[in-house]
Amino acid sequence: LATENDILLQNLSIIKNYIPKITCACSEIKSLDVPNIHITDDDFLVDEFFFKKAADLLEKDSSLAFVSGGVNMRYENPDGTVKKIVRQSMNVHGRIDGSTYLQDFQGELTKPTSTVSTVFRKRAFDEMNALDMKECSDSSMYMLALLWGNAFIFEDVVAEYRIRQRGS
């Protein structure tokens, strides 16, 4: 059984191995900038190549504000054992125009469940003055990025979002 510390170490290992490669690639590609990645201790990646695939797409298409992927919801018992894992369904896959996505964001068109499954283009947040936002939730991050550009969403699951049941 994976403990919270094991999961944190797994995340750190993936980040340690892939962030320098993305950062290195980004420093050579002016249109890409350094991507923003937001991971909390409840989330972890299950696709070790996700960062590379995301960086490749961001490099290839300068209109993309973010690249995302599918997420499993991992429900855990108070003792940390897995109760169930449920694939979060999304009805958006592939490349989608930002304004089209934004028009029906969280209506007919679902948003990625968590930011762990997403690499955002830093320039999108810089140019949209993200630091001036008073609130920064998952939804506001996605909406701000979509105001700047387009999105690409892999159908494959790239991460898990943990939901812990608290014990008494």
Image (cartoon, helix red, strand yellow):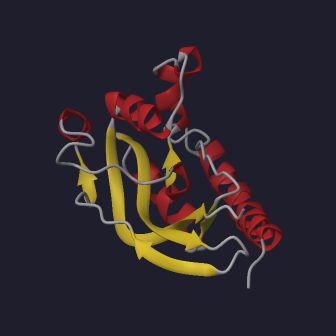
Instruction: Report the side of 139 relative to 149 (left or right).
Output: right
Pick the front one: 103 or 161 = 161
Give the farthest residue toward the bottom.
1
Q: Dividing the picture into quarters, in which one does residue 27 lie? A: top right
Q: Residue at x 72, y 65 (%)?
A: 11
Q: Is residue 80 above or below residue 131?
A: below
Q: Position of residue 112 (x, y in %)?
A: 39, 53
Residue 70 located left or right of residue 121:
left
- What residue appears at the point 78 percent right and 75 percent down from the top-left corner? 3
In the image, is 160 to the left or to the right of 79?
left
Q: Residue 104 in the image: x percent, y percent?
A: 19, 39
Q: Is residue 49 in view?
A: no
Q: Is residue 100 visible?
A: yes
Q: Answer left or right for 54 relative to 166.
A: left
Residue 23, relative to residue 103: is it above or below?
below
Front-most of residues 21 and 100: 100
> What residue is rendered at 73% in x and 75% in y?
79
- Image quarter of residue 75: bottom right
Q: Residue at x 20, y 42 (%)?
A: 107
| On-image quarter of the N terminus | bottom right
Quadrant for the C terminus in the image: bottom right
| Residue 106 drawn at (x, y percent) | 27, 43
